Amino acid sequence: AYARWARDQISGKAVPLVHRLKQSVPLFLLGFLAMALLNTLGFFSWVSAAVDYNVQLAIQRVGDVLLVGALAAVGLGTRLSSLRAAGIAPVVIGVSVSATIAVLGYLMIRYVGFAV
């Protein structure tokens, strides 16, 4: 977003606010917020009751498949040569952060009871 803004400042052209917002805000973020709002308002429960089908479960399963696809795309796009070129520090940081999240998640489930 900043790069686009800087480019427009250098070129001297005026860009309308709506156009800048469209460039700056990813579309998936708006979709995520819309789905969260609909879920909070109970829309999916209402639809599930109206059509006698668990729409929430179907959306959850589709989301799981999309998440697995996104993680696979990230993994398949990772080149070992680029990891070697970056050095050991980013790998150590990534593994450390992942391990910390795993341990904290386990502790929360074990002692606080946040099982989903």
Image (spheres, rainbow, N blue to C red):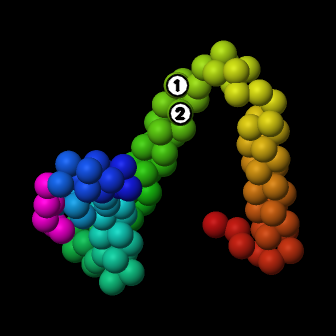
| Horizontal and vertical percent position of residue 68 | 51, 40
User: Local crowd at mark 1 within 10 Å, few (<14), some, or many (≥20)?
Assistant: few
Which of the image's four quarters has the C terminus?
A: bottom right
Residue contact between numbered discs 2 and 1, judged by CB atoms under 8 Å: yes
Quote the CA–CA distance across marks 2 and 1. Answer: 5 Å
Is 45 positioned to the left or the right of 87 in the image? left
Please determine whether, in this image, residue 84 is positioned above or below residue 15. Answer: above
Is 63 positioned to the left or the right of 113 in the image? left
Q: Amino acid at mark 2?
A: Val
Residue denoted by label 1: 77
Residue denoted by label 2: 74
Is 16 positioned to the left or the right of 7 in the image? left
Q: Which residues are magenta?
A: 13-18
Q: Is residue 82 visible?
A: yes
Check disc 2 and report its element: helix, strand or loop.
helix
Name the one closer to the observer, 31 or 93: 93
Q: Is residue 54 visible?
A: no
Please determine whether, in this image, residue 54 is positioned above or below residue 102. Answer: below
Residue at image point 30% right, 64% down: 30
Say the numbered circle drawn on residue 44. Answer: none
Quarter of the figure with residue 5: bottom left
